[in-house]
Image (tube, helix red, strand yellow):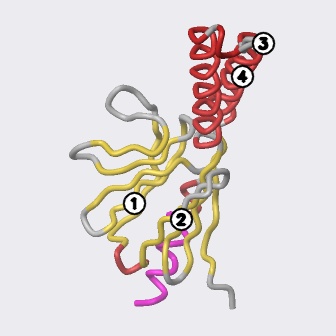
Amino acid sequence: MSFLLWSGQAVGHRRAAVGALVGVACAAGAVTLFPDHPFDRPKTLAAAVLLSVAAVAAMVWAAAMAHVGVQISMYNVRIRHGLLPMPPITVPLRMVNSLRAVDVRPSLAQRWGWTWIPGRGRAVIVRPGPALLFDFAGREFTVSVDDPEVAEAALNRMRSSAR
């Protein structure tokens, strides 16, 4: 018997590609700007260091916007980040009051990435489109995934057979 009820993911190609391009451009700028004798030109060295930091930040942002995965088992919900070494969010299934499929269109009120919105809960949005809206014991959590209707049906089917 399989304990995994549903597994899904979302990939944010556009945002990840933009972040990677910005990171590469900043790194290339830092390499070309780096002076032959760094301590003779401190302002140029500072600009090269700033561009290097910007390159690293853009690459981390690209990795953060690239992928998110969700697994719903008979015991818990696990939300993981595929490209960053972050611990997954694991919530016991008994804490899930409801789950529904929603359509996400990020704007000023609903942001991209791992966010917290006062009064609306937390979210992991890597691309516009279908998402799952969890109610974890009164706290909302939105996650971009492909085919959220299948997850909703799997959870409802499991809960109806348990009664």
Badge 1 element: strand
Q: Nearer the viewer, residue 21 or 117?
A: 21
Question: Which image quarter is the C terminus in?
Answer: bottom left
Look at label 2 and name its amino acid.
Pro
Badge 4 element: helix
**Residue identified by numbered label 2:** 88
Look at label 1 and name its amino acid.
Phe
- Mark found first going from the N terminus, 4 or 2: 4
Q: Please give left or right for residue 26 compared with residue 115 in the image.
A: right
Q: Where does the image place residue 89, in percent across and percent down from the top left?
A: 48, 65
**Residue identified by numbered label 1:** 134
Callout 1: few (<14), some (14-19), or many (20+) C-alpha neighbours within 10 Å?
many
Q: Which residues are magenta?
A: 152-163
**Residue identified by numbered label 3:** 36
- Mark found first going from the N terminus, 1 or 3: 3
Label 1 with label 3: CB-CB less than 8 Å:
no
Mark 1 or 3, closer to the camera: 3
Look at label 3 and name its amino acid.
Asp
Residue found 76% across the figure and 18% down from its top: 31
Q: Please give left or right for residue 89 compared with residue 115 in the image.
A: right
Q: Measure how far apart labels 4 and 2 are at the Cα level.
A: 30 Å
Look at label 4 and name its amino acid.
Ala
Mark 2 or 3, closer to the camera: 3
